[in-house]
Image (spheres, rainbow, N blue to C red):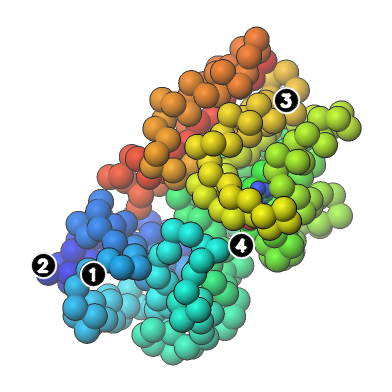
Amino acid sequence: MDLDALLSAARKKREPLLRSSDTTARRLFHGPADGLDGLVVEQFGDVLIAQTFAGHRLLPEEQLRRAIDRFRHEVGARAVYRKLFVSDRSAVPADVAAMHTNPRPWLGEPVEPEITVREYGLGYAIHPYDGFSVGLFLEHRENRRWVRSAAAGRRVLNAFSYTGGFSVAAAAGGAVSVSSVDLSKRYLEWSKRNFEINGIPTAGQRFFRSDVLDFCARARRQGRRYDMVILDPPTFGRLRRPARTFVLDERLADLLRGAVGLLDPGGILLLATNARSIPLDLLGRDLGAASGARECTILDPPILPPDFAGDPDYSKTIIARIT
Ligand SMILES: C[S@@+](CC[C@H](N)C(=O)[O-])C[C@H]1O[C@@H](n2cnc3c(N)ncnc32)[C@H](O)[C@@H]1O
């Protein structure tokens, strides 16, 4: 297999994205959609992140390294950080975790612990060696843009908010309030940093360190209501105190009921998932069931970003109005 040719073809397909000056983060190689299962390459400014799948023998290591290094020069990147995808993030082997936090890159020169990228003009902090995930899920580029365009005057709840990508987009779009809910204190702090990068005062924002289901139950009891809820849960996770696993297939119905219960009439739900086990039509049916007697109108979702084209099972989004 000629990886150089696959990488070049993938880059050519993305020329219009590469020319954009207000968006400096994009996926340059999208696994099977670009001809090689088990390899993902993303660009964050002048840094590349190369993900390979643990246990997946793609190519002889030296061949992979040489091809990615040539590609790095082709796109003018200073460094490539390597990440090994392990599906259970709570059971990452120590050597893999050490690799994910090593400031020395796989290829090129070490870079700063934080770099800033732009997406449709908004800034986001990226940490190239702070773990497997670097701070921004690029498949949501168009979803974030949609949220920004629809947020004016709305009270927005961002559940599973991670580093606050959707929260910043909502605030930039004129949301009257944005509540971000995540279990991780570190990610909530990172969200505040993203607000700061964009010059948005965090005083008007709310940050809740909580399990989303617990948050929904509490918020409902307290009478809090929203005009837009963003629900982008992980597919699988392990929670501490009390120790339990989170399997999306098992929790989706509860999450949807929890989210719908917090929406005032006419409110919008944006539901997104990468779970391959949950097809789009099932998401729609589950949302209809969770809406009960309330009318649930499915709206046209934004297009999948062109750098994610060719793998429709990967990233799915439903946007609905609940009356
Ligand atoms: C898939 S990411 C969400 C990505 C985010 N929507 C975005 O686009 O930036 C999963 C996030 O959910 C958080 N998380 C996992 N389980 C959770 C739970 N039960 N309650 C709240 N947050 C949780 C993790 O800490 C992580 O930040």
x then y, percent, for residue 134:
53, 67
Name above or below for residue 261 compared with residue 62: above
Name above or below for residue 51 compared with residue 16: below
Name above or below for residue 15 compared with residue 103: above
Look at label 4 and name its amino acid. Answer: Gly
Q: Earlier in the sequence, mark 1 or mark 4?
A: 1
Look at label 3 and name its amino acid. Answer: Gly
Q: Earlier in the sequence, mark 2 or mark 4?
A: 2
Q: Quadrant of the N terminus?
A: bottom left
Residue sitting at x 63%, y 34%: 255
* Distance in Å between CA atoms under marks 2 and 4: 38 Å
Instruction: Decide: few, some or many residues near mark 4? Use Cα within 10 Å; few <14, some 14-19, many ≥20.
Output: many
Asked if the residue at tag 4 contacts the one at tag 3, i.e. Cβ–Cβ closer than 8 Å, the answer is no
* Distance in Å between CA atoms under marks 3 and 4: 32 Å
In the image, 134 versus 249, the foreground residue is 249
In the image, 135 versus 285, the foreground residue is 285
Q: Where residue 308 is drawn, which disc sits there?
A: none
Classify mark 2: helix, strand or loop: loop
Q: Which residue is the site of mark 1?
A: 57
Q: Is residue 138 visible?
A: yes
Classify mark 3: helix, strand or loop: loop
Q: Viewer-nearest of labels 2 and 3?
A: 3
Look at label 1 and name its amino acid. Answer: Arg
Q: Which residue is the site of mark 2?
A: 1
x then y, percent, for residue 72:
32, 78
Instruction: Decide: few, some or many residues near mark 2? Use Cα within 10 Å; few <14, some 14-19, many ≥20.
Output: few
